[in-house]
Amino acid sequence: MVVGLGPGNRDSFTAEALTAIREAQVVVGYHTYLNLIPDLIEGKEMVATPMRGEVERARQAVELAAAGKTVAVVSSGDPGIYGMAGIIIEVAGGRVPVKVIPGVTAASAAAASLGAPLMHDFAVISLSDLLTPWETILKRLEMAAAGDFVIVLYNPRSHGRPNHINTARDIMLKYKAPATPVGIVRQARRGQEERTITTLDRMLDVEIDMLTTVIIGNSQTRVAGKYMLTPRGYHL
């Protein structure tokens, strides 16, 4: 099983995810994710690996499952969205069945805090170029902006790539008005949430880091009181 933990707070776990972890004999995951569920994994066999240890984590999980153990690989957010589901399926190669248990992804968690910015077509783009060439990311940003999608940016800024978010904003300004609403949510649903609604031309004035999700509106997105709203087109 590949289990999505959502943003990390217990209220956002699905009942299916909780059941899967409780029934697992072995829980596999990144140290930070395991630290979110100490009470659920007490007394279980655990396999903890560091960040960027995804391939080794997947191999160990598959070997344990092939040996007959019930294994839960935990992943933040939704395991099928920039998570562990894909690599587990690849490594398993049909040797063992894989069940993917969804979780609340950062786009959904941040959007809920902002109101309803994702009510129409949207694109999710990660600015991390660890596994995707930066040239490919730039092309995707251009196409999504030109298509007037609402755009959700994951992994917007880190110490190693502090300026990717600046470049992304500059691309957005080629196709979107400076006053386009932008929602910035840091630590979404993690108990220390910080929420800001600003505009495309002012968004870089707000603190943005790896714990931040950025939602850039389309041409119809507006601010309605304290909410960010992208109308779906209903006639009121």
Image (cartoon, helix red, strand yellow):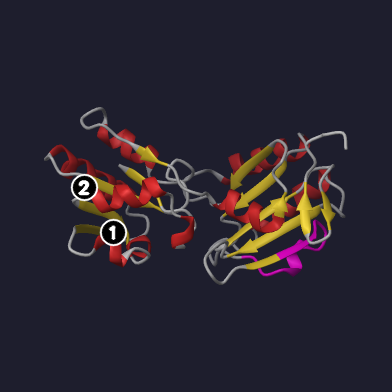
Closest to the observer, 196 or 167: 196
For label 1, the SS is strand
Q: Residue at x 55, y 53 (%)?
A: 106
Tell me residue 117's x, y (percent): 72, 48
Q: Residue type at mark 2: give it.
A: Gln
Q: Which mark is residue 211?
A: none
Q: Residues within 10 Å of mark 2 (few under 14, many from 20)?
A: some
Please give left or right for residue 178 compared with residue 154 in the image.
Answer: right
Q: Is residue 189 visible?
A: yes
Q: Position of residue 178 (x, y in %)?
A: 86, 54
**Residue in the picture at 80% in, 41% down:** 231
Q: In the rendered structure, does residue 15 fall within the stretch colored magenta?
A: no
Q: Are marks 1 and 2 in contact (CB under 8 Å)?
A: yes
- Residue under the image location 11 percent in, 40 percent down: 67
Residues at marks 1 and 2, CA–CA distance in whole angstroms: 10 Å
Question: Is 179 displayed left or right of 99 in the figure?
Answer: right
The residue that mark 2 highlights is: 60
Mark toward the start of the polypeptide (1 vs 2):
1
Which residue range is magenta in the image? 196-208
Tell me the quarter of the image containing the N terminus.
top left
